[in-house]
Amino acid sequence: MITPKEYKSRRKDLMAVMEPNSIAVIAAAPHRLRSKDTHFPYKQDTTFSYLSGFPEAHAVIVLIPGRSQGEFILFCREKDRLRETWDGFLYGPEGARDEFSADDAFPISDIDDILPGMLEGRDRVYFGIGKDADFDKQLMGWINNIREQRGRGAIPPGEFVDLDHFVNEMRLIKTSSEMKLLRRAGTISAAAHRRAMRVATPGLYEYQVQAEIEYEFMMQGASAPAYTTIVGSGKNGCVLHYIENSHKLVDGDLVLIDAGCEYQDYAADITRTFPVNGRFSSPQAAIYDVVLAAHTEAVAAIEPGVPYNVANDTTVRVITQGLVDLGILNGQVDELIAEDAHRDFYMHNSGHWLGMDVHDVGDYKIDKRWRDYEAGMVLTVEPGIYIAPDNVEVDEKWRGLAVRIEDDVVVTRKGCEQFTADVPKQRSEIEKLMADR
Ligand code: GLY
Ligand code: MN
Ligand code: MN
């Protein structure tokens, strides 16, 4: 759990990097329509959530460093008995003050009257420029109103700065309470993958495996899958974002499962690939071992002070060498790497930052150079090999094979730790788990 104290210290850290006489304005995410009269489950904007923990839509955070009546102002919906009967509990401005430590809180319906007065006379406005077109328009409306009052002495803000850039840097290094939530998300997701290995069998549908995975997520208290679960059997594994999950598992095929839950706003992201019938064939084993070696070496390469691209470069080298050894690529490894020859078989990078968003925020480069790993960064390591079913350049036995192995790691003081390793990835361990079920 993130305590009110930690939210407060995040706001304090953000305000410390804001220029004098500035204001930050952060909008809650809107509800999104899924189908007439029904919405997608609500997902709060992660910047908004990071700074407040406030879970409702129709809300705006305002931060004004140094404001004598209080620096943290929250606009939100008023309590409304009828609305709450339909859509659930609302905190109201009083709840915003009592439960979320807002110094001041106002009904969102009063924002047009109150916020322009807070913007007026500030030099700079920090906000998530371009994130939400409707909010951009609303904010510019308030600014234009102030501009129109110039003749009466009003001073409109003149500088607009992207707020998320600053928050993203803070979010990149995880605190110990964030790590607890990430570890929990990882543990639940690992259990879900073990469950999938136990139930998968020829004749079961991919969506039934998805149901087993998501059952485990929800039974263990996760709020949702962190992204749409991928269960790709056979050649479906070659489609990187395969989410139809509509085919039957076939004896002799592999199944690639990419699934992770969201637990109290923090995501996990795990992929395992295993044989539907519990035994790897020899071509499957050969490809699998190359991907596993790439994964192992990349994890071993991640430590503080090493540039971000080292993990990816390691996977490219191991996979290119592996494909040459298997006769799938021909040529000299260094030349093949220089030509990006692996891109036909390994078309994504080795990972991404992980946190409140599954593809989490934070720059990968600083001043055009890959940034170095630092303790507290969390990322995925997820090499893969995908051999298109219609690739006539390779021997038939390889066609349609797809393997990805993905774990989540936290950079420690001396290296990194995989915190989703609680689901087997050695072939012998997978076969044992599947034989013993
Ligand atoms: N599940 C999305 C990814 O692996 O990046
Ligand atoms: Mn994934
Ligand atoms: Mn991933």
Image (spheres, rainbow, N blue to C red):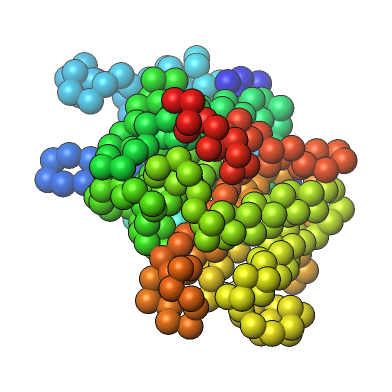
Res 36 visible = yes
246 vs 396: above or below: above
Q: What residue do we see at 46% from left, 68% from top?
A: 397
Tell me residue 278's x, y (percent). Answer: 45, 40
397 vs 25: above or below: below
> On the rendered image, what quadrant is the C terminus found in?
top left
State the image quarter where residue 332 is shown. bottom right
Res 76 visible = no
List the single residue furthest toward the front: 282
Residue 193 left/right relative to 78: right
206 vs 51: above or below: below
Q: What residue do we see at 69% from left, 85% from top?
A: 331
State the image quarter where residue 290 is shown. bottom right
- Pick whichever, 60 or 343, lies toward us: 343
> On the rendered image, what quadrant is the N terminus found in?
top right
Q: What residue do we see at 45% from left, 46% from top?
A: 275
- Pick whichever, 57 or 350, lies toward us: 350
- Pick whichever, 121 or 398, lies toward us: 398
Residue 98 left/right relative to 413: left
Tell me residue 53's x, y (percent). Answer: 51, 29
List the single residue furthest toward the left: 36
Q: What residue do we see at 39% from left, 20% from top?
A: 219
Tell me residue 133's x, y (percent). Answer: 37, 59
346 vs 259: above or below: below
State the image quarter where residue 214 is shown. top left
